[in-house]
């Protein structure tokens, strides 16, 4: 662990930030876009976003093994910034939804690519930093709401204003330009200010052993030390007569092998492994449905409930969204502390805070004014950030090393597929009631209870 890894920690954090920043952007612009374009089914905007996220996760997850971690590492942020800036010119609702899908295609590749390249440069002693990266996830939400407060709070149509003309509703366009500009700065910082090396693991997989050795030595030099690795060490691992297959088709085949029936069968080969894998997929699926179902319509719920309380306004809606997001920042750090406590560990922390997330959602339905609603939502966001911090770190730990990629893929796919279902359900639900809140709260509580049945606790143990 040295200077190179700490620099990588910073620029990888841009990917974590983008992964939360742009879904929050979609949430914040949902109401202004619906007011301006008056679509028959507003949740189609969130549906387009989730389809883009799923496509991006699949494409970049496979692509980084074909054309390398380095290119994917930079292109995901670049594409997100490009389409985000273009989206500000959307002339109608359909165009806005298409642009949301396109920027989400870039966003969807951040976590699979960035986590891969980060872990492949980290020594085992510092792998906990992958959990700490969730702080960037939370800070991005604060930044988005901080910028949204003046722009969307002052430069968009008031709730119920008819007609809502473009000239009166420019705030959401300015907001997207600001977020696109911020993402562009993160891309430029990665591309111009930080010289990233191709992952040695990827290079070895392509048969480029000499380059892999050179990268290891260069990283050691940047860290002010030396490495004893030589090309002979790598060649000693090869069987007699071995010939490396370095073409793109071989890379694709290696990637597909991770998802073949044999790798999946191992995850269900014993009753305990089957129970663990099935429950993890179910937990990710329930959270994947519950979180976007509520979070995507949070500003809408705040605005409409504020109107009912006679103390709501567009300005107050986005001010409250900022306050809520700030309460989520310490969640990642507190989660990292709690998972190491004896008697609580990963399972206990994850279960408690997942259930609490659902409980606080139910509590929000009892609010009699906007201040009470704000308090419930703050508690929800704090607990959900602890939940996500633990979930991202715990999931890889309970899969066997050879099947870890397959297990993570199954969990992520379950999450994205059910994320696509959230806006579809919302289209057929009455959003002027608390139906999305009740549904989301129930999903979180069930997911938290399922955690208790998981057979493996990874605190203080080597990964399987």
Image (tube, rainbow, N blue to C red):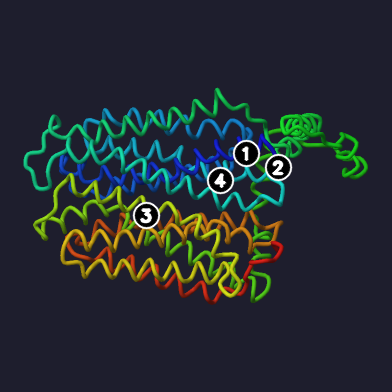
Whether 456 is drawn above or below 205: the answer is below
Quadrant holding the N terminus: top right
Q: In this view, does 244 lie to the left or right of 454?
A: right
Label 2 – label 3 distance at C-alpha: 31 Å
Disc 2 vs disc 1: Cβ atoms closer than 8 Å?
yes
Residue with the mark numbered 3: 327
Label 1 – label 3 distance at C-alpha: 26 Å
Which disc number belongs to residue 1? 2
In this view, the residue in front, 179 or 32, is 179
Considering only order in the chain, which callout, 1 or 2, is on the residue closer to the N terminus?
Answer: 2
Label 2 – label 1 distance at C-alpha: 8 Å
Residue with the mark numbered 1: 6
Question: In the image, residue 187 lies at what x, y percent?
Answer: 49, 29
**Which residue is at a point 47% across and 58% down the rendered structure image?**
388
Mark 2 or 4, closer to the camera: 2
Question: In the image, residue 169 lies at what x, y percent?
Answer: 16, 35
Considering only order in the chain, which callout, 4 or 2, is on the residue closer to the N terminus?
Answer: 2
- SS class of the residue under badge 3? loop
Residue with the mark numbered 4: 112
């Amino acid at each position: 662990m040295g200077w190179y890894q700490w620099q990588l920690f910073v620029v990888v954090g841009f990917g974590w930030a983008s992964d939360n920043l742009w879904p929050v952007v979609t949430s914040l612009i949902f109401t202004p876009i619906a007011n301006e374009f008056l679509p028959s089914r507003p949740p189609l905007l969130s549906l387009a976003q989730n389809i883009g996220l799923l496509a991006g996760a699949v494409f970049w997850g496979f692509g980084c093994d074909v054309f390398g971690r380095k290119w994917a590492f930079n292109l995901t942020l670049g594409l997100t910034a490009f389409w985000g800036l273009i989206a500000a010119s959307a002339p109608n609702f359909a165009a806005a939804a298409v642009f949301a899908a396109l920027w989400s295609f870039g966003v969807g590749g951040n976590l699979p690519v960035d986590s891969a390249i980060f872990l492949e440069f980290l020594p085992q002693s510092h792998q906990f930093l992958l959990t700490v990266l969730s702080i960037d996830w939370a800070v991005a939400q604060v930044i988005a709401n901080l910028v949204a407060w003046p722009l969307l709070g002052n430069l968009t149509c008031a709730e119920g204003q008819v007609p809502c003309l473009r000239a009166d509703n420019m705030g959401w366009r300015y907001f997207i330009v600001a977020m696109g500009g911020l993402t562009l700065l993160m891309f430029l910082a990665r591309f111009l200010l930080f010289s990233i090396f191709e992952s040695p693991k990827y290079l070895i997989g392509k048969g480029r052993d000499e380059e892999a050795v050179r990268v290891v030595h260069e990283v050691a030099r940047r860290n002010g030390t030396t490495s004893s690795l030589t090309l002979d060490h790598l060649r000693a691992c090869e069987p007699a007569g071995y010939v490396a297959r370095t073409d793109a088709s071989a890379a694709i085949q290696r990637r597909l092998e991770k998802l073949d029936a044999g790798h999946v069968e191992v995850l269900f080969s014993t009753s305990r492994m089957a129970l663990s894998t099935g429950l993890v997929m179910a937990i990710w699926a329930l959270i994947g449905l519950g979180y976007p179902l509520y979070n995507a319509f949070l500003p809408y719920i705040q605005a409409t409930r504020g109107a009912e309380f006679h103390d709501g306004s567009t300005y107050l809606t986005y001010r409250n969204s900022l306050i809520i997001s700030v309460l989520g920042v310490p969640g990642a750090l507190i989660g990292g502390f709690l998972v190491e406590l004896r008697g609580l560990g990963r399972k206990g922390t994850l279960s408690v805070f997942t259930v609490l997330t659902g409980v606080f959602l139910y509590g929000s339905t009892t609010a009699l004014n906007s201040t009470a609603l704000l308090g419930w939502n703050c508690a929800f966001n704090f607990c959900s950030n602890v939940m996500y911090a633990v979930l991202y770190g715990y999931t890889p730990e309970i899969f066997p090393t050879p099947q870890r990629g397959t297990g993570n893929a199954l969990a992520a796919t379950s999450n994205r597929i059910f994320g696509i279902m959230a806006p579809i359900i919302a289209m057929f639900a009455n959003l002027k009631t608390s139906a999305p809140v009740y549904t989301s709260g129930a999903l979180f509580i069930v997911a938290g209870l399922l955690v208790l049945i998981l057979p493996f606790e990874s605190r203080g143990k080597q990964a399987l």
